[in-house]
Image: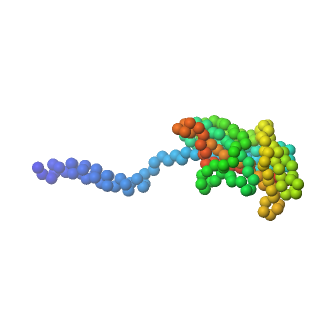
Amino acid sequence: MKFQEYKLLIIVVTAILALVVASPALQRFLVYPQTEFFTESWILGPEHKAENYPFNITANSGYDVFLGLGNHFGNFSYYQVQVKLRNQTQSGADSFNRTSSSLPPLYSMYVFVADNGTLELPVSFSFSYVSGGNESRVDLDSMIFNGETLGLSGYMVSFDSEGEQRLVNLFFEVWIYDSALGGFRYHERFVGLWLNLQ
């Protein structure tokens, strides 16, 4: 047989070998559909805007904000939002280590959010407290959260290191239902407000 008779076979085999050898290099230039699955959370002020957040709090006065959740997980998701409160010496959720706060939740909200859906939950709260004997400390009695009274006996807030503010952090940890686990797991998302108790 002559070369002319095998010319087509040689061309096909050479083309296939060239594609196999070049495929790792081609992967750098090919664009595959990329989807990042995540949940977003946010807090908006009383006018549904990212402004006018409550900061200077007085006893027995009501305050309103909106807690938002956005689901970009590719499916319907079931969330638990744990409401927690801490002073400046207590540990909160840790973004770096991706851990939740060890503080017990004061209140929990359970919500479903559709894929690519958002939900804004109205949040209203007020604190009942009295100043300690030396006025540098505040002893919290209770908090009314969305109309429900939560006991805060044992919660105490002192002035910060500059002696100017008595700060508490009202924060919301996002937990997601994990069917493999059969329960909720911390979803590494949290938002919060620092509040100055006057």
Q: Residue at x 80, y 56 (%)?
A: 158
Residue drawn at x 62%, y 43% as measured from the top left: 175
Q: Is residue 109 found left or right of 146 in the rendered image? A: left
Of residue 165 and residue 12, the one placed in the foreground of this image is: 165
Residue at 88% across, 54% down: 133
Q: What is the x, y in percent for residue 131? A: 87, 52
Q: Is residue 23 left or right of residue 38?
A: left
Q: x and y percent of residue 188 in the render?
A: 61, 48
Residue at figure coordinates x 63%, y 39% from the top left: 79
Looking at the image, which is closer to me, 108 or 134? Answer: 134
Q: Position of residue 3 (x, y in %)?
A: 15, 53
| Residue 180, percent from left and from top | 52, 38
- In the figure, 91 relative to 143: above or below? below
Residue 26: which quarter of the image?
bottom left
Of residues 129 and 22, the one drawn nearer to the viewer in this rendering? 129
- Is residue 42 in view? no
Residue 76 shows in the view: yes
